[in-house]
Image: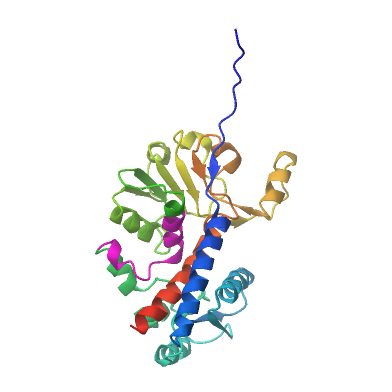
Amino acid sequence: MSARIHKKRQSRLLDGRLVSDFLLTRVSHEVKKLHKKKIFPKLVIILVGKNPASLSYIRQKEKATQRTHIQYEHLNLRETIATKKLIAIIEKLNRDKTVHGILVQLPLPAHIEAPLVLRAIEPAKDVDGFGAYNLGKMFLSMDFENLAPCTPRGIIRLLEYYKISPVGKRVTIIGRSNIVGKPLAVMLINRDATVTVCHSKTKNLASHTRTADILVAAVGRPKMVKADMVKKGAIVIDVGTTKVNNRPSRSEAKQIVHLNSLVGDVDFENVKRKASWITPVPGGVGPMTVACLMENVVRAARRMNM
């Protein structure tokens, strides 16, 4: 009798770095085509204060603009700036025809009225996709997702690249933010998925996650999604990124060093044994968000010059 060799099933990685590299190359080609038409896509990022995490995110975006030949300007404003003054700066950028994308880096200091600031951005230049106009258009159909929020768009692009169709699939999203959860739910419904959105008031969360063909975690709670909450063969997308400040245990040390001190919402090492596909943290959704921001800037520039 021949011996049977049993191998542990390993999930495949949804590699955001690989796919973002592909997207940035494509964006770079598009920018060169626009340059030939004397159109020079430009992104302006506004940072209020000097939040270290925000500065890190901005550096990633700046590198992407350099890679894609998108013109870039960074306005670093004092932390004490008033809402009215910040809005005046945005309105000036709205009138500047050389600017195609305006991004206000969140979070803003507590004294600033963030909804008023985001509302002040001209919808045609709202490359973050957080304004009511661009969010509202998404409800019409997939054809109106012109400037969709970058993280949800990045997740869609990731699925597209790996030829994972959401059609008919049961999707559970943990998190209902306006930045990820809600817009992603709409985008997946537009693509014929059946979507459940869970949140802090959801009862028996695991009963929803265990039935999901695609599970998205976007709440910022390290390793909250355990293996027993995941359906065998599910596609798991981890949006969470939490910096590890506490001293790791001996068993976790290697894993945390590998993750560059960032931990996602999913217990990666255990869940990957059940999932068919899974995103790593870092290197999953994060790079896709930046790449899709570059896509939005080019799309905005093209539409403003139609």
Q: Quadrant of residue 17?
A: bottom right
171 relative to 248 in the view: left or right: left
- Residue at image point 42% right, 38% down: 206
Please name whichever residue, 146 or 48, is drawn nearer the observer in this view of the structure: 146
The spot of residue 267 in percent (x, y) is: 57, 42
Mark yes or no: residue 106 visible. no
User: Where's the C terminus, which quadrant?
Assistant: bottom left
Task: Residue at the far right: name it.
Answer: 250
267 relative to 190 in the view: left or right: right
Please name whichever residue, 236 or 132, is drawn nearer the observer in this view of the structure: 236
Q: Is residue 5 above or below residue 162?
A: above
Q: From which residue to which does the magenta span run?
A: 141-158
Reply yes or no: does residue 157 show up in magenta. Answer: yes
Reply yes or no: does residue 248 show up in magenta. Answer: no
- Residue at image point 58% right, 43% down: 268
Q: Quadrant of residue 96?
A: bottom left
The spot of residue 78 in percent (x, y) is: 59, 85
User: Where's the N terminus, which quadrant?
Assistant: top right
Q: Is residue 154 above or below residue 96?
A: above
Please name whichever residue, 143 or 177, is drawn nearer the observer in this view of the structure: 143
Q: Quadrant of residue 91?
A: bottom left
